[in-house]
Amino acid sequence: MDKPVISLEKYEVDEINFSRTLTDEDKENSEVFDVNFSGGLTEDEKYGKVTISVTCLDKETFRKVTVTVSGYFLLNDTENIKEYLIVNGSAIIFPYVRSILSMVTSFDSETALLIPTVNILDLMKDKSESK
């Protein structure tokens, strides 16, 4: 049986920041959902890391939450491994980010903030086009 091209070794929560105080900038910001992706490879391209940071604003209840999660992956040789890592690694890690964000916001209120399931590739394209 062939080895998978990418397999999750572990994930770590890098940051959880929850606030009930919105700044003036937050109040004026039209973006209520912001996501950033980053990643990299070891020199031998056997291991990779993907980091996803999501910030959500709920202006009605004055809540702002940021969750940053990094996933560490074992990689098997393939062409375009960096693209493969960022797209597929993000698709693997994103459900953890969604779950953590929902759980943290549910501690404070019966109304948890929910991030819908998304097509990671489309989200990345939208993000790069807006730059």
Image: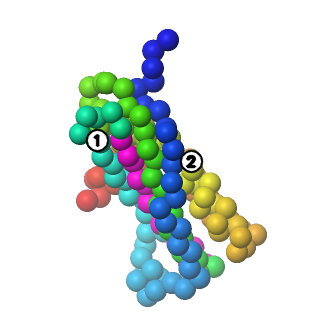
Residue 29 to residue 46: above or below: below
Residue 100 to residue 81: above or below: below
Q: Residue furthest right?
A: 110
Q: Quadrant of residue 73?
A: top left
> Which amino acid does the dot numbered 1 rest on?
Thr
Q: Position of residue 39 (x, y in %)?
A: 33, 48
Of callouts 1 and 2, the N-terminal one: 1
> Which amino acid does the dot numbered 2 rest on?
Pro
Q: Position of residue 69 (x, y in %)?
A: 48, 56
- Which residue has dot 2 on it? 95
Residue interval drawn in magenta? 48-60
In the rendered structure, find residue 42 and report the number of the disc placed on it: 1
Q: Residue furthest top?
A: 1
Judged from the image, the secondary structure of the residue bearing numbered disc 2 is helix
Residue at 38%, 58% (x, y): give it: 36
Q: Residues within 10 Å of mark 2 (few under 14, many from 20)?
A: some
Question: Label 1 to label 2, Cα distance in Å?
Answer: 25 Å
Q: Is residue 118 visible?
A: no
Judged from the image, the secondary structure of the residue bearing numbered disc 1 is loop
Q: Quadrant of residue 98?
A: bottom right
Instruction: Please tell me which residue lies in front, 16 or 12.
Output: 12
- Magenta-drawn stretch, dominant element (helix, strand or loop): strand
Q: Position of residue 91 (x, y in %)?
A: 47, 41
Instruction: Please tell me which residue lies in front, 106 or 12.
Output: 12
Residue at 47%, 33% (x, y): give it: 7
Q: Quadrant of residue 78?
A: top left
